[in-house]
């Protein structure tokens, strides 16, 4: 019979997986949206839409305000997951296709593991580090094979976004132990909203809103799913299974994104992509069984 710890960890992995499924359409949806909307409106405006929904949910459920000592952590989530990555990736998506960006951000799991070491007190084993590094190396190899290995300004923006979102993921996973998974992203959105009103309002004033329905659909997706609902699953999964371990599930995101791009946007999914997808699934499965020492309580 499985121990309670293993069952809880497995549940965390499943929550994390479905969170990644939600995140996997973020880049294609952003690409569609920034073709007609200002990147600042897409990158930051989506948080304002999500903040309205978050405030309504917090009010209906009568959640108590977070304690003062949690404000710093929530601001880190704001900086990384609400401002940093969405804004930087929106700028980058003006110049590179979703498939290219999907490969570049494939190193998010390794970056999240590094952030988890410093922010959550987790201590991955050597085997876990090796599988994480191997996963990152496979993604980089894929980038070169597919021709996406040439570094551009957009790549630098995406890499900066990777660093930001990894810190936001790790800090949110830490806070989820204390506040709850969905509460973390909701409170972070509410805190961020006043800071975003001026820049978003200024860009919106100059924006032509007579755009195709596809742009509105893309903006709606990144606002409701990418910036809000997917985080419910993601942070809850991290609270159950640990930041470092659940973070490895995101190794699958580049290939889920490519699959979605193929099914929804008609992009070609080659045999090479399928081979690398299988390799990544194996790496995730191996990494799942590598020990990760977790802090006895949130730090």
Image (cartoon, rainbow, N blue to C red):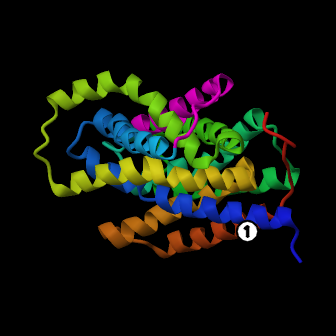
Q: Residues within 10 Å of mark 1 (few under 14, many from 20)?
A: some
Residue beneath the point at 64% across and 66% down:
14
Location of the N terminus (image quadrant): bottom right
Q: Position of residue 34 (x, y in %)?
A: 27, 44
Q: Position of residue 290 (x, y in %)?
A: 84, 59
Which of the two residues, 7 or 125, is positioned nearer the viewer here? Answer: 7
Q: Which residue is mark 1?
A: 285
Which of the two residues, 113 or 201, is positioned nearer the viewer here? Answer: 201
Name the image quarter holding residue 193: top left
Residue beneath the point at 63% across and 24% down:
72
Instruction: Look at the image and say whether residue 92 sits in the magenta stretch.
Output: no
Which of the two residues, 135 or 165, is positioned nearer the viewer here? Answer: 165
Residue beneath the point at 76% across and 33% down:
118
Q: Position of residue 241 (x, y in %)?
A: 74, 56
Secondary structure of the magenta portion, mostly?
A: helix
Q: Position of residue 93 (x, y in %)?
A: 35, 44
Q: Which residues are magenta?
A: 62-88
């Amino acid at each position: 019979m499985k121990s309670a710890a293993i069952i809880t960890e497995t549940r965390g992995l499943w929550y994390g997986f479905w969170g990644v499924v939600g995140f996997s359409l973020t880049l294609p949806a952003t690409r569609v949206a920034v073709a007609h909307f200002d990147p600042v409106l897409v990158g930051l405006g989506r948080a304002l839409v999500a903040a309205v929904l978050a405030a309504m949910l917090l009010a209906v459920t009568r959640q108590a305000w977070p304690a003062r000592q949690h404000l710093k952590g929530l601001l880190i989530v704001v900086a990384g997951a609400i401002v940093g990555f969405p804004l930087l990736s929106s700028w980058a998506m003006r110049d590179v296709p979703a498939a290219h960006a999907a490969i570049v951000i494939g190193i998010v799991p390794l970056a999240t593991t590094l952030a988890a070491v410093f922010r959550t007190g987790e201590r991955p084993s050597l085997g876990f580090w090796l599988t994480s590094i191997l996963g990152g190396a496979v993604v980089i190899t894929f980038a070169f094979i597919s021709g996406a290995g040439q570094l551009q300004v957009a790549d630098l923006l995406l890499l900066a976004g990777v660093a930001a979102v990894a810190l936001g993921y790790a800090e949110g996973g830490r806070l989820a132990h204390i506040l709850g998974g969905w509460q973390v992203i909701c409170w972070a959105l509410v805190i961020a909203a006043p800071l975003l009103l001026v820049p978003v309002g200024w860009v919106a004033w100059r924006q032509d809103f007579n755009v195709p329905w596809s742009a509105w659909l893309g903006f709606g997706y990144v606002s409701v799913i990418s910036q809000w609902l997917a985080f419910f699953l993601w942070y809850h999964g991290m609270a159950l299974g640990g930041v470092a371990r659940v973070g490895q599930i995101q190794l699958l995101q580049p290939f889920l994104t490519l699959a979605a791009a193929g099914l929804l946007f008609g992009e070609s999914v080659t045999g090479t992509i399928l081979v690398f997808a299988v390799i990544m699934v194996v790496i995730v499965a191996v990494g799942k069984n590598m020990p990760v020492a977790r802090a006895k309580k949130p730090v």
